[in-house]
């Protein structure tokens, strides 16, 4: 029997927003302030739980799926949801990605239990909820495909070609999408004895945290020199000497939905990559052998 919705039940979206903001009040009245969330985790949690638009459906988030049963669901509901979610381009999602989405939901309800004193759902372990997904492994690109992508970036004549070339080169150098869109102009140092360096976003840390300075791969420096003179900075989102490096025509930093589209547009311009371009993921490129390896004396810092 399906339970009826109680109008007095709390708003799950408000609870999520307060939790991810780092300021909320526990069930015993204690105020929690200053909990640190890195941008990547906050983004994934908001996506999986509250708003997850894709190419094939307006919203496949957990809240949209479960509706009025948000406080009355069974583990089977979570397993069914996990089996239905897809990547933002509509392609099949990997088992690891499904697992991360389920972990976000489980963490939300654990917060509701531990901090808000809500009833316990006794959710099974993630591996029992997700199960296995067949045929979703994505092999890395071959060296010739990586060379073709580099060539495509050099010859790309679509919108804002200098930005497209730099974004592609950063991905070819091994930077993941989250790193590329989080690089700030003011974290790039040009006047160094050993050449230009940048400080990339630190993994699993606060949004403002950056790692130690790392040498920028020489080909990326060339792309950077072409892009900076035409970078369309505009306050308050970006400025000439600070703010996100990769920006839109309005000066706003790129997001995680725009970045893959940019890399795919570059790949689609090359006849040898045209077939794989629609489903190409920047992460796949970043984890493939870099064509810049022979151009460098040291690591990229990614």
Image (cartoon, rainbow, N blue to C red):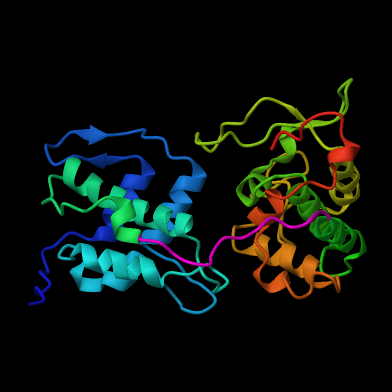
- Residue at point 25% right, 59% down? 12
Residue extending farthest to the top is: 193
Residue 77 horizontal/vertical position (percent): 25, 68
Q: Main secondary structure of the magenta part?
A: loop
Is residue 17 left or right of 213 when viewed as pictured? left
Rendered location of residue 263, percent (x, y):
73, 62
Quarter-of-image position of residue 154: bottom right
Residue 189's image quarter?
A: top right
Residue 124 in view of the camera: yes
In the depicted structure, whether residue 221 falls above or below residue 135: above
Is the residue 35 above or below the residue 9 in the image?
above
In percent of the image, x 11 and y 76: which residue is there?
A: 2
Camera-nearest residue between 282 and 235: 282
Determine if the magenta segment contains residue 141: yes
Q: Residue at x 81, y 35 (%)?
A: 216
State which quarter of the image contains the C terminus: top right
Rendered residue at 17%/62% (across/down): 71
User: Magenta segment, which residues?
Assistant: 131-143
- Measured as percent of width and height from the top left, residue 261 is found at 68, 67
Tell me: 207 left or right of 75. right
The N terminus lies in quadrant: bottom left
């Amino acid at each position: 029997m399906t339970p009826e919705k109680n109008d007095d039940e709390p708003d799950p979206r408000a609870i999520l927003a307060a939790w991810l903001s780092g300021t909320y009040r526990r069930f015993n009245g204690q105020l929690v302030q200053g909990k640190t969330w890195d941008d990547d985790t906050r983004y994934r949690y908001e996506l999986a739980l509250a708003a997850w638009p894709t190419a094939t459906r307006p919203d496949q988030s957990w809240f949209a799926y479960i509706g009025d049963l948000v406080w009355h669901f069974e583990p089977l509901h979570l397993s069914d949801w996990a089996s239905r979610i897809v990547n933002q381009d509509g392609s099949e999602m990997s088992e690891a990605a499904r697992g991360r989405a389920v972990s976000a939901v489980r963490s939300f309800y654990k917060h509701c239990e531990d901090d808000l004193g809500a009833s316990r759902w006794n959710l099974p372990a993630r591996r029992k909820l997700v199960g296995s997904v067949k045929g979703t492994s994505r092999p890395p690109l071959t060296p010739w495909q990586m060379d073709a992508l580099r060539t495509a970036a050099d010859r790309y004549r679509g919108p804002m070609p200098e930005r497209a070339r730099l974004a592609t080169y950063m991905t070819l150098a091994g930077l993941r999408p989250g790193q590329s869109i989080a690089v700030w102009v003011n974290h790039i140092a040009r006047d160094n004895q050993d050449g230009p360096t940048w400080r990339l976003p630190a993994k699993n840390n606060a949004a403002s945290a950056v790692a130690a300075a790392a040498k920028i791969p020489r080909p990326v420096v060339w792309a950077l020199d072409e892009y900076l003179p035409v970078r369309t900075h505009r306050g308050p989102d970006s400025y000439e000497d600070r703010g996100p490096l990769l920006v839109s025509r309005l000066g706003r930093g790129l997001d995680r939905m725009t970045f893959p589209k940019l890399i795919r547009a570059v790949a689609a311009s090359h006849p040898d990559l045209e077939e794989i371009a629609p489903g190409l993921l920047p992460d796949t490129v970043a984890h493939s052998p870099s064509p810049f390896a022979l151009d460098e004396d040291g690591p990229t810092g990614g």
